[in-house]
């Protein structure tokens, strides 16, 4: 899927509306496809995440309450599809462990577990409620597209976007400081969300300085992927703990738990090291840099 960027010669209003509508309509297209293919659900949720990221980038362009309203709306749409995505995450990370596994008994357990998850995903995709709920979501997204088209957008491009980017950067900056002290799963998950927003911001802002924004986007994407994989291990770990076959097994749980813990620790170490480079500037310095760059490229005084 092609990802739009902010156009230097377009107004703030045109940029905001075109990007929001692009992903809103792309979500409708993915939902209209065969939902038995988990990739279509995954892509739909990514559209919602990119919308929520762009809302944060352009938040001061909206009238009071509009940012919160749209952000909550797209958050809730994504949550309606989250269970299917969690199953896919469990399958993917389970297969990764299966490939790297050494113990035959552990590999056999994981193979059976993954097969059960695939059956679960297949049953979920065949649920008639999913089709009905999907059509309801499509209708709702079409109504929202009309609302977006009629929104009142105001503000100076460089100030609006620099402020929005700074708020996301600042949250990620402080979460990194917290994660360095205590590596709790929920904190790394919160940091992951801010990192993903920042990654998308660099993509949206690519036209202002392609070489630099592109490099920042690639590094931030790598960090997002490491933290995403960490979160997938957490989902797998929590699901296994609720599995009767896992709890009643005397040998495999200890080995699998050790492997998960080792993988999570390695991912956390890599993430923190890269994060210290990505969040090298103070939030104030980051905002100053972004506003000066955006102002220069836009030719705004």
Image (cartoon, rainbow, N blue to C red):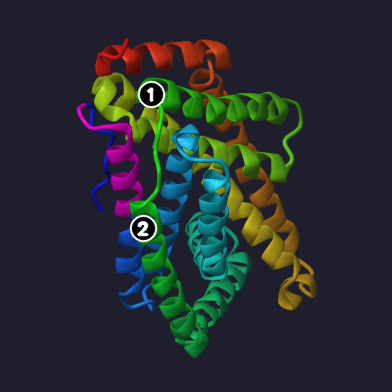
**From the viewer's perspective, is 102 left or right of 20?**
right
Q: Residue 114: horizontal and vertical position, in percent?
A: 54, 72
| Other-residue count near label 1 (Cα within 10 Å), few / some / many at <14 / 14–19 / ≥20 | some
* Residue identifier under label 2: 24
Residue drawn 53% across the image and 20% down it: 279
Distance CA(mark 1)–CA(mark 2)? 24 Å
Can you say which quadrant of the picture contains the C terminus? top left
Q: Could you tell me if residue 252 is visible in this image? A: no
- Residue 256 vertical position relative to residue 240 in the rendered view, above or below: above
Residue drawn 50% across the image and 78% down it: 121
- Mark 1 lies on a secondary structure that is loop
The numbered dot on residue 156 is 1
Taking the view exactly as shown, the residue that stands out farthest to the bottom is 128
Q: Residue 169: horizontal and vertical position, in percent?
A: 54, 26
Q: Quadrant of residue 193?
A: top right
Q: Residue 161: horizontal and vertical position, in percent?
A: 42, 27
- Residue 156 vertical position relative to residue 81 in the rendered view, above or below: above
**From the viewer's perspective, is 36 left or right of 72?**
left
Question: Would residue 53 be counted in the magenta stretch?
Answer: no
- Residue 250 vertical position relative to residue 199 in the rendered view, above or below: below
Dominant SS type (magenta): helix
Q: Which residues are magenta?
A: 9-22
Q: Could you tell me if residue 13 is visible in this image? A: yes
Residue drawn 65% across the image and 53% down it: 234
**From the viewer's perspective, is 74 left or right of 44?**
right
């Amino acid at each position: 899927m092609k990802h739009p960027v902010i156009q230097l010669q377009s107004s703030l209003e045109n940029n905001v509306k075109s990007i929001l509508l692009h992903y809103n309509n792309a979500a409708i297209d993915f939902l209209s496809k065969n939902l038995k293919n988990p990739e279509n659900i995954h892509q739909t949720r990514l559209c919602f995440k990119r919308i929520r990221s762009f809302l944060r980038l352009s938040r001061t362009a909206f009238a009071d309450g509009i940012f919160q309203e749209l952000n909550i709306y797209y958050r809730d749409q994504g949550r309606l599809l989250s269970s299917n995505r969690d199953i896919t995450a469990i399958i993917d990370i389970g297969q990764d462990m299966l490939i790297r596994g050494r113990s035959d008994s552990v590999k056999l357990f994981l193979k059976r577990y993954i097969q059960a998850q695939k059956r679960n995903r297949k049953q979920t995709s065949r649920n008639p409620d999913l089709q009905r709920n999907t059509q309801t979501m499509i209708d709702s997204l079409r109504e929202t597209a009309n609302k977006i088209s009629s929104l009142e957008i105001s503000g100076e491009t460089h100030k609006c976007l620099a402020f929005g980017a700074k708020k996301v950067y600042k949250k990620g900056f402080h979460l990194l400081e917290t994660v360095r002290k205590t590596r709790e799963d929920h904190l790394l998950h919160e940091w992951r969300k801010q990192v993903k927003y920042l990654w998308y911001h660099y993509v949206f802002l690519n036209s202002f300085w392609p070489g630099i924004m592109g490099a920042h986007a690639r590094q931030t994407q790598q960090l997002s992927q490491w933290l995403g994989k960490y979160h997938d291990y957490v989902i797998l770990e929590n699901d296994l703990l609720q599995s009767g076959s896992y709890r009643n097994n005397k040998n495999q749980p200890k080995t699998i738990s050790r492997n998960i813990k080792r993988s999570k620790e390695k991912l956390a170490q890599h993430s923190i090291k890269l994060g210290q480079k990505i969040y090298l500037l103070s939030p104030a310095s980051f905002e100053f840099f972004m506003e000066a760059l955006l102002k220069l490229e836009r030719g705004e005084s």
